[in-house]
Structure formats: structure tokens, C-alpha cells
Image (cartoon, rainbow, N blue to C red):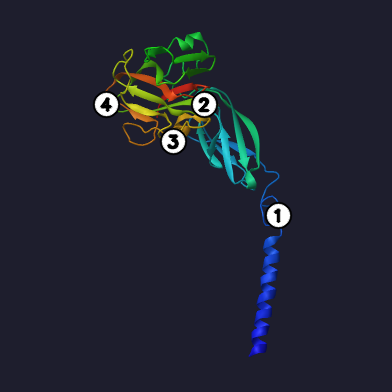
């Protein structure tokens, strides 16, 4: 009996030592065991979708890729390795794919897509939404909301930046747009800031009531950023439909889709401000509103 027990103990001890040796050697990420990649192939293909206007499938090669980040001109965003995109306007687009491998190693590559013709069924209803020049800026009306005028829109080629010293100062811009009853529209824009804020918001409205000087606009909130809801607390860059966190009044969810119960004029309005506002301001550009 004692001999058998001793033999079992000896076998157990040797097994434990062997397992200890196996788990102690190169078991951490980065110790040459392949858990951290040192290269990854970010290549991808672009395939037009048959029967769908200006629609493309981006397909990343999957070997060694854990996740994909894409940029089609709105800043990088996390996507799928097979991503469907729509480019309604004619022009040349540079698509960048960032492949993310084990251990966080990344590599990127870019390809161009040339869209020959704009989609006539989905024109951008926003005038001057890219802020390319003074004529674009003139399409917008500034809505003075703070009595001191401390918050203001700073227009540069390609963007409009709300700058504010904080203290709840805010400012708005808007324009009138004609819509059709019961038709669905999507609203989107590029938003960015190099630093975060606290007690800050950027809200997008599509309401039927006329904006008034000095009066906070609250008619039909569609989307936005809000530090209370958890976004814009740190630096951000991307489409508002992706990086935003403000709920749509109509759907009670985060959505950039809107429709109206009458045909006629609505007001697309962006209102931005806050108490502890980022020193870099919040920048918007590429503002679009299109039929869905």
C-alpha cells in the first residue's frame, strides 16, 4: 500500500513539474510565441454592388486580422471585414483600411474609388454643408443664443468650429430645407475635436418651427453629442451617426433617420455649447441630408 501511494505521489509530482515548465516558458504576449503579430496584410478588394447605385462592398483579407478600421472620408471608424458603403456624390474617394492583428499591431493601405455620376435619387439637400468657401457659409444663418456672444462659429475652408469659453455659452447655425411628407431622410456630418469636454453638447434638430434669436431650439432633436450621455468626453473623429450618443426624439434611440407628417419647409439646426468646453472647439463638416 505504501509503495503504491509513493508511486502515485511521484507521478503527480513529475506531472506538476512538467506542467509548470510548460506554462512558465514564453506564456506572455510578446515573448515570441506568436501571440503578438509583427506584420499583417491590410489588403482589401472593392466590388460594385449590382443593381444598387454607387454602392460598394469592401472586403478585407481575413488571415491574421482580428478587426478592421475603415475611413472613407469621414475619419476612421471600427467596421466589419466585409463593409458595405454608399457614395451618392460623384467624385474621387480615398478608402483606407487599417487591419488590426494580435497584440494590437496595425497596418493600413488605401485605394481610390472614382464615382462617375451622382445618384439623382439621393441629392444632398443641405446647401453649403461642406463649407468650402464664403458662398457655402452664406447658406447658413447664425442663431445667436448667448447674450454675451462669447460662443461663436469659426468658419474655415471645409469646416465650421464652435468655440466657447464655457460657462454655458452656446451658439447655433441653421438653414431651411424642403421635405416631402412621410419620406424618410438621413442626416449625417463629420464631427471632431482634438480634446474632450465636460458638461458639453452638440445637438442636431430638424423641426418645423422657425428658430428665434436668444431662444434655445428644441423642436425635433435627431442626433448629437452629449457628455451626460457618454460621448465627447475625450477626443473624437468620425461620422456623427457613429460617434454620437444622443437619442432621436422620434425613435427614443440613437438614430439619424427622420421623417415628417407634412410636405413643406423644415429647419436643420445645429446647436452647440457647454459649461466646461474643450479648448480645441467642436468642428463639423460634410453636413448631409438625403432621402433614404
User: Disc 2 marks which residue?
Assistant: 192
Q: Residues within 10 Å of mark 3 (few under 14, many from 20)?
A: few
| Foreground pick, 91 / 7 | 7
Between 48 and 240, the residue placed more toward the observer is: 240
Disc 1 is placed on an element classified as: loop
Q: CA distance from mark 2 to mark 4?
A: 33 Å
At 56% from the left and 42% from the top, the residue drawn is 81
Q: Is residue 49 left or right of residue 104?
A: left
Q: Residues within 10 Å of mark 2 (few under 14, many from 20)?
A: many
Q: Nearer the viewer, residue 180 or 229?
A: 229
Residue 287: mark: none
Q: Between tags 4 and 1, which lies in front?
A: 1
Where's residue 154, x and y in %?
A: 49, 14
From the top left corner, tell me how far across and down residue 34 is, in percent. 69, 52
CB within 8 Å, label 2 to label 3: no
In percent of width and height, residue 150 lies at 43, 14
In this figure, which residue is indicated by the disc labeled 4?
Answer: 261
**Residue at screen point 51% across, 34% down:** 85
Going from N to C along the chain, the mark reached first, 4 or 3, is 3
| Mark nearer the N terminus (1 vs 2) | 1
**Badge 1 is on which residue?**
33
Lower position in the chain sequence, tag 1 or tag 3: 1
Q: Dot 1: few (<14), some (14–19), or many (≥20) neighbours within 10 Å? A: few
Q: Is residue 144 left or right of residue 153?
A: left
User: Which label is found at residue 230?
Assistant: 3
Q: CA distance from mark 1 to mark 2?
A: 39 Å
| Label 1, label 3: how far apart the Cα atoms are | 38 Å
Spatial CA span between label 4 and label 3: 31 Å
- Who's the residue at 58% across and 44% down the image? 67
Amino acid at each position: 500500500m505504501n509503495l503504491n501511494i509513493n508511486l502515485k505521489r511521484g507521478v503527480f509530482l513529475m506531472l506538476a513539474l512538467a506542467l509548470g515548465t510548460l506554462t512558465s516558458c514564453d506564456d506572455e504576449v510578446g515573448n515570441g510565441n506568436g501571440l503578438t503579430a509583427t506584420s499583417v496584410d491590410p489588403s482589401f478588394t472593392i466590388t460594385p454592388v449590382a443593381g444598387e447605385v454607387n454602392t460598394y462592398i469592401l472586403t478585407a483579407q481575413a488571415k491574421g486580422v482580428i478587426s478592421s478600421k475603415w475611413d472613407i472620408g469621414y475619419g476612421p471608424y471600427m467596421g466589419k471585414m466585409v463593409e458595405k458603403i454608399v457614395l451618392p456624390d460623384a467624385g474621387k474617394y480615398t478608402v483606407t483600411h487599417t487591419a488590426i492583428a494580435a497584440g494590437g499591431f496595425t497596418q493600413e493601405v488605401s485605394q481610390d474609388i472614382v464615382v462617375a455620376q451622382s445618384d439623382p435619387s439621393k441629392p444632398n439637400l443641405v446647401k453649403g454643408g461642406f463649407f468650402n468657401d464664403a458662398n457655402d457659409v452664406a447658406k447658413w444663418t447664425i442663431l445667436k443664443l448667448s447674450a454675451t456672444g462669447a460662443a461663436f462659429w469659426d468658419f474655415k475652408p471645409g469646416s465650421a468650429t464652435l468655440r466657447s469659453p464655457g460657462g454655458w455659452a452656446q451658439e447655433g447655425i441653421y438653414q431651411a430645407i424642403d421635405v416631402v411628407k412621410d419620406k424618410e431622410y438621413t442626416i449625417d456630418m463629420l464631427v471632431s475635436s482634438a480634446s474632450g469636454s465636460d458638461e458639453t453638447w452638440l445637438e442636431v434638430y430638424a423641426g418645423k418651427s422657425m428658430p428665434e434669436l436668444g431662444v434655445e431650439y428644441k423642436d425635433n432633436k435627431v442626433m448629437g453629442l452629449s457628455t451626460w450621455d457618454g460621448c465627447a468626453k475625450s477626443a473624437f473623429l468620425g461620422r456623427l451617426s457613429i460617434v454620437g450618443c444622443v437619442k432621436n426624439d422620434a425613435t427614443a434611440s440613437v438614430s439619424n433617420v427622420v421623417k415628417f407628417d407634412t410636405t413643406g419647409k423644415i429647419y436643420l439646426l445645429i446647436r452647440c455649447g457647454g459649461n466646461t468646453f474643450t479648448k480645441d472647439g467642436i468642428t463639423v463638416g460634410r453636413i448631409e441630408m438625403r432621402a433614404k
